Image (cartoon, rainbow, N blue to C red):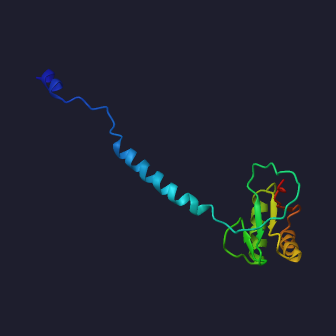
Amino acid sequence: MFEHSRRSRKSQMSEINVVPYIDVMLVLLVIFMVTTPLLTQGVEVDLPEAISNEVDNDIEPFLLVVDRNGQLSLNEEKQITAGEEVVRQARIVFKRNPKTPFLVKGDRHVEYQAVMNAMVLLQQAGIPKVGLVTEPPER
């Protein structure tokens, strides 16, 4: 009798049905394909041309953008940022990682004073070195 109950048990199935996982992955792929172009939008800045060395750094830089109208934004977001917010954000980033490169990206048509004001804001935040972003000249 004991032997009979062992034989009547069904053997366990050891296969995994992967079709639902494939469906989920395809949906995620479509979502990422649609949202990725939206993440790359930023402030359009016409950079001045200059011959300079590229910055080799594995750390993402803190980028302060001065657009054609002299408006400030952080890391190429379209949102206009006030000077006090720039100082606050720069202090936070510098405290987290003092090796973070701080760069000012000024439009070539903006007044020089607006770019200098952006650099002064970073200086007020205690940033010791500030770089300027340029575009290589066309040949």
Quadrant of res 6: top left
Spot the residue most to the top.
Answer: 3
Q: Residue 2 in the image: x percent, y percent?
A: 14, 23
Q: Is residue 19 above or below residue 107?
A: above
Q: Residue 50 in the image: x percent, y percent?
A: 88, 59
Quadrant of res 11: top left
Q: Is residue 106 above or below residue 37?
A: below
For the residue pair 83 and 9, the one nearer the viewer reads as 83
Side of 75 where 132 appears, left or right? right
For the residue pair 4 and 84, the one nearer the viewer reads as 84
Residue drawn 85% across and 61% down?
A: 49
For the residue pair 41 and 63, the one nearer the viewer reads as 41
Q: Residue 37 in the image: x percent, y percent?
A: 57, 60
Residue drawn 47% across and 51% down?
A: 29
Residue drawn 26% across and 31% down?
A: 12
For the residue pair 36 and 68, the one nearer the viewer reads as 68
Q: How many labels were placed on the picture?
A: 0
Q: Residue 21 in the image: x percent, y percent?
A: 39, 45
Q: Is residue 54 above or below residue 124?
A: above
Quadrant of res 138: bottom right
Spot the residue most to the front.
Answer: 139
Which quarter of the rendered picture does the N terminus lie within?
A: top left
Side of 62 where 53 appears, left or right? right
Q: Is residue 71 above or below residue 51?
A: below
